[in-house]
Structure formats: C-alpha cells, structure tokens
Image (cartoon, helix red, strand yellow):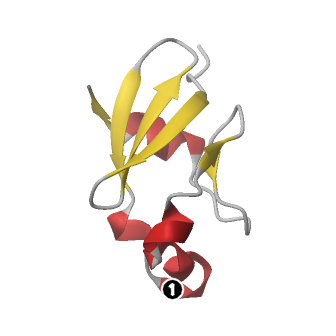
C-alpha cells in the first residue's frame, strides 16, 4: 500500500503546517524541530516559512528545503 501524498499545505501558527493528503486526510505537522542547521535555518524567518507549498509528493520551500514524505504523514497529528 502506498503512503498518501501531500496535495495542499497551509502554514499555521507556531511553525506548524496543515497538510491535506490525496486520500482526504488533513493533518498537522510541527516543523519547529527541523529549524536548525544551515539547510533549514532559513525556515526560522516567518515570512519565508509561510512560502511553503505542496508539490504533489511532499512539502517544500522556494530554496529547495523539503521534508521527508514519510515523516510528514506518519509523524503528523490528524485533525
């Protein structure tokens, strides 16, 4: 069985994102633990963080940062 993929993402408060998956599920994912190190530190800029988008597979930001599709599905909380 294939894992659902991200179809839509909306940034919400406190560096969390609401993700809608292709199976209709909506889940909340906390990005705060990822905002460290050179590659992800730019996500700490709230306006940049809000530029998150779904690419039909996972979620990503304009400069290439993305999150593992398995993590955003299995480590998120159902709404």
Disc 1 crowd rating (10 Å Cα; few below 14, some 14-19, many 20+) is few
Q: Residue furthest bottom?
A: 38
The answer to whether 2 appears left or right of 46 in the picture is right
Expressed as whole percent of the image width and height from the top left, the position of residue 8 reads 57, 31
Q: In this view, does 69 lie above or below 45?
A: above
Q: Position of residue 1 (x, y in %)?
A: 59, 13
| Observer-nearest of 73 and 6 | 6
Quarter placement of the C terminus = top left
Q: How many marks?
A: 1
Viewer-nearest residue: 4 or 10 = 10
Where residue 77 sits, quadrant-wise, is: top left
Q: Residue at x 27, y 61 (%)?
A: 14
Say left or right for 73 vs 75. right
Can you give x and y, in whole percent of width and height, for residue 11 in the image?
Answer: 43, 49
Identify whether 51 is placed above or below 77.
below
Q: What element carries label 1?
A: helix
Q: Which residue is drawn at 47% across and 12% down?
A: 24
Compared to 42, does 21 lie above or below? above
> Residue lying furthest front in this view?
47
What residue is drawn where x is 52% and y is 38%? Answer: 9
Residue labelled with disc 1: 37
Residue 13: % across, % down = 28, 54
> Could you tell me which residue is drawn at 44 percent across and 81 percent down?
36
């Amino acid at each position: 069985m294939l894992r659902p993929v991200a179809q839509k993402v909306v940034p919400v408060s406190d560096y969390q994102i609401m993700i809608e998956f292709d199976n209709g599920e909506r889940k909340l994912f906390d990005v705060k633990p990822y905002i460290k190190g050179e590659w992800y530190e730019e996500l700490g800029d709230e306006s940049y963080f809000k530029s998150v988008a779904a690419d039909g597979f996972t979620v990503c930001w304009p400069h290439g940062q993305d999150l593992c599709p398995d993590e955003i599905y299995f480590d998120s909380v159902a709404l």
